[in-house]
Amino acid sequence: MVSSEVLIKAQRLTKKFGNFTAVDHIDFEVYKGECIGFLGPNGAGKTTTVRMIYCFSPVTEGELTVAGMNVSTQSREIKRMVGVAPQEDNLDPDFTVIKNLQVYARYFDIPKAEASKRAIEMLKFFQLEEKQTKSIDELSTGMKRRLIIARALINKPQILLLDEPTTGLDPQGRHIVWDEIHSLIKQGVTIILTTHYMDEAAALCDRVLIIDNGKIIETGVPQQLIKEHVGEDVLEVAFDETVLKKLKEELPEAHIEIFGDQIRVFINQPHGVFERIVKKFPGVNMTIRNANLEDVFLKLTGRKLRE
Amino acid sequence: MTENSNPSPSVSRLPKLTYRVWTVWRRNLDVFMKTWHVNFMPSLIEPILYLLAFGFGLGTFVTNIEGIKYIQWIAPGLVAITVMYGAFFECTYGSFVRMYFQRTFDAIIATPINVEEVIAGELLWGATRATFNSAIVLAVVAAFGLISTPWFLAILPVAFFGGLLFASLGMCFTALAPNIDFFNYPTFLLITPMFLISNTFIPLATFPSQLQTIALAALPLTHVADLSRLLVVGKIETLGGLGPEWVLLLAVFWIAIVTVVLFVLSIYLMKRKLIK
């Protein structure tokens, strides 16, 4: 489904708030039909980048084009073809579920009959049909999320911006949203998804940009990034000085990190190495698990907690 | 094209408005109509209470002002006050709730509608609300038999433009308000004084001449009240040393010029606040 046609192009894109540089000279391209993930800790610059794409925040420096149009001069045309699902709930509490979609359609000049037709379609797709006459207050967090995504699709956008679509949802809620995003990807919608959940990015994205401190620090396909940076497996063991020392002797080429009270060992070698190690440490509780995007992320961005 | 050092390129220009302003106005009308019976009540009950308390009560002591009965003198004042309250509160508390608590503006700005159009839609809605409210007050005044000119329907356009003025004034405060409690300042330092001294319940002509000058120069309600009195009871007084025809002319131009200035200014201030 991913074509070679570039839909969004950023060149040295920069956003400053006073002296603070939120987005720092980043370059990226988004191809038509792909689902790209913007990954990063809180405050990395993901949302700011998304806001520049839908012409909400003016660009400080650099260039950003959407479908060949400049965000600074052709905001109306761009906003017509983009759907935005922000991370905060900005549904209209003064209206019912279906009226939210109908009123939003009016902002896009969609005629009334067509708006109602699309609203029903969207509610069906997002399994909210029986909630259509309910007020927003009566919806669960997960339903509100889905309604925000439904609203973002009312103008049949070519590009869908999902800013942390599952933050705050329970596991069931997340999986429903994931399924729905999956079927949108199949329909050929180009999606930009920001998240700090690595499993979400791995499950949904064709490609991810890892962003930290306003810079893109790595780009690639999730599985390849995992292989490249942390290998296939990770060995985890409770922190212990003597075990750590011995591990370093046994695996001089391994990358060893201390996460809290845990030692994690990364090694760019095929399966089997860790099994051999486990046998050498009888009585020590060691776990071998598949490496994931979170390991890549933590390795690249460090472990500082940021707010 | 690669360098763009100006963070908000069009902030200083005149607002770019299209027909899309209507969709924002319409959103507020839809919400209003949902609960219209509650929304119309204050405009219906308040003037009745004022006319009873001040007109009949106080009116037994104050028998007439410049040849008209006190109850008839305050009736146009009530219409003007309604215009002020309707528009000012709609575009302070109402707009602030939509902007800050409901994030409605953010949601609309993500569509082809721009910030200027959102604010213009809010201002026109504030003016509309003032017009609705004043129409009800006018009906109450008519029911009391207090209308004595055939020109009274011209109150509605006056209410609309006066409403636009107070809506724009309110929106300036909304743009400056760090939180919702801030509105106590303009309400008690500006709106309440106007309510009392802008030729509404007490004839301005009885105040010291300096106060008359201030009321004519700086208080918008004075001009709305003067026009309202002309159109309801057919009377406009000499104020601040100006003859009736000059007071009328001043009212028309004052409202027209200040409305345009505040309309543009409030959009500019809101744009500065919302675009980051």
Image (cartoon, helix red, strand yellow):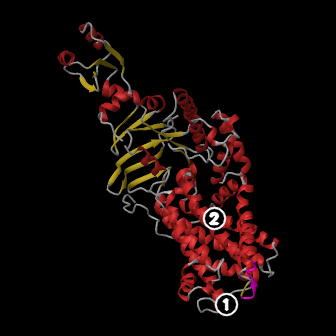
Q: How many numbered marks does the figure carry? A: 2
Q: What's the residue at 77%, 72% (across, down)?
A: B141
Q: Is residue B67 magenta?
A: yes
Q: Amino acid at mark 1?
A: Pro
**Chain letter of disc 1 in the image:** B
Q: Is residue A189 magenta?
A: no
- Left-right relation of A182 to B9: right
In this view of the protein, can residue B15 be seen by the observer? no
**Which residues make up the magenta segment?**
B66-72
Q: Quadrant of residue A89?
A: top right
Q: Quadrant of residue B41?
A: bottom right
Q: Are marks 1 and 2 in contact (CB under 8 Å)?
A: no
For disc 1, the neighbor class at 10 Å (few under 14, some 14 to 19, many from 20) is: some
Residue under pointer 1: B244
Give the vertical position of B50 relative to A299 (above or below): below
Q: Nearer the viewer, mark 1 or mark 2?
A: 1
- Badge 2 marks a residue whose secondary structure is helix
Residue under pointer 2: B126
List x then y, in percent, for residue A295: 34, 27
In this view of the protein, can residue A87 be seen by the observer? yes
| Residue in front for this viewpoint, B112 or B254 | B254
Give the vertical position of A289 relative to B4 (above or below): above
| Residue in front for this viewpoint, B99 or B61 | B61
Q: What's the residue at 65%, 67% (across, down)?
A: B127
